[in-house]
Image (cartoon, rainbow, N blue to C red):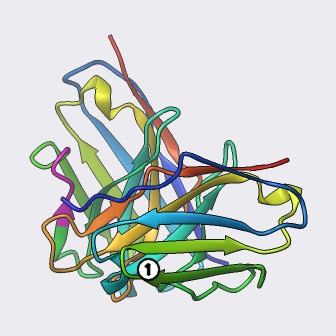
Amino acid sequence: QVQLVESGGGLVKPGGSLRLSCAASGFNFNDYYMSWIRQAPGKGLEWVSYISSSGTTIHYADSVKGRFTISRDNAKNSLYLQMNSLRAEDTAVYYCAKFTIFGGWFDPWGQGTLVTVSS
Amino acid sequence: SYVLTRPPSVSVAPGKTARITCGGNNIGSKSVHWYQQKPGQAPVLVIYYDNDRPSGIPERFSGSNSGNTATLTISRVEAGDEADYYCQVWDSSSDHPVVFGGGTKLTVL
């Protein structure tokens, strides 16, 4: 079955960097768009970024543009999110999800990894 | 950017029908998707393309979308349906192509 497993979360100081990973299995990873979505503690869902199957099309939310970089390694069935210049408001659970581009929905989602930005 | 409005909470008795709305300007012209999130768990897609159900989602879940309102309907509500529900729209022509609603807490009385 389709499985997405995030890793790389943790505690980081404001201004610091962190790299999240998402390991995919159970489907042809290199055929699908992928995405990151986050959820601040006690808050709603916020889309962060998506990347095309080849990696040539990328889109970011305004809140992370210029600070976060999404990438993928199709040979390793892996999705990444490089997060730089982190702020307290980036504190959230970060989910990776398979993204169906022609309809715009996310399914399935990984279990998430918590990023805490605090001094 | 596109704004989605929703009731923060909806309460319903077991066995009754719950309706959760998602409002947006001409939302009927967009694709709307719905997610269920239980405490401590990742979201799960329950409706896509306004009214299609992924495999494994009970027929009790249905959706509609017209005008300025999309609606998620849960028939014969069960205790296990208690969760947060999020609507989401996709607009490929927008600079902000993915928008989530703020979430509605469904309480089963």
Q: Quadrant of residue A35?
A: bottom left
Residue drawn where x is 59% and y is 63% of the image: B20
For the question of whether residue A93 can be seen, the reply is: yes
Near mark 1 (Cα within 10 A), the count class, few <14, some 14-19 or many ≥20, is many
Q: Quadrant of residue A74?
A: bottom left
Provide the chain ID for the residue under circle 1: A
Q: Position of residue A53 (x, y in %)?
A: 30, 81
Residue drawn where x is 65% and y is 67% of the image: B19
Relative to residue A50, is residue A30 drawn left or right? right
Residue A68 magenta-highlighted: no
Relative to residue A53, is residue B44 drawn left or right? right
Residue A61 magenta-highlighted: yes
Q: Most extreme residue toward the right, as rendered?
A: B15
Residue behind mark 1: A29
Q: Magenta region: which residues?
A: A59-63
Residue drawn where x is 60% and y is 54% of the image: B42
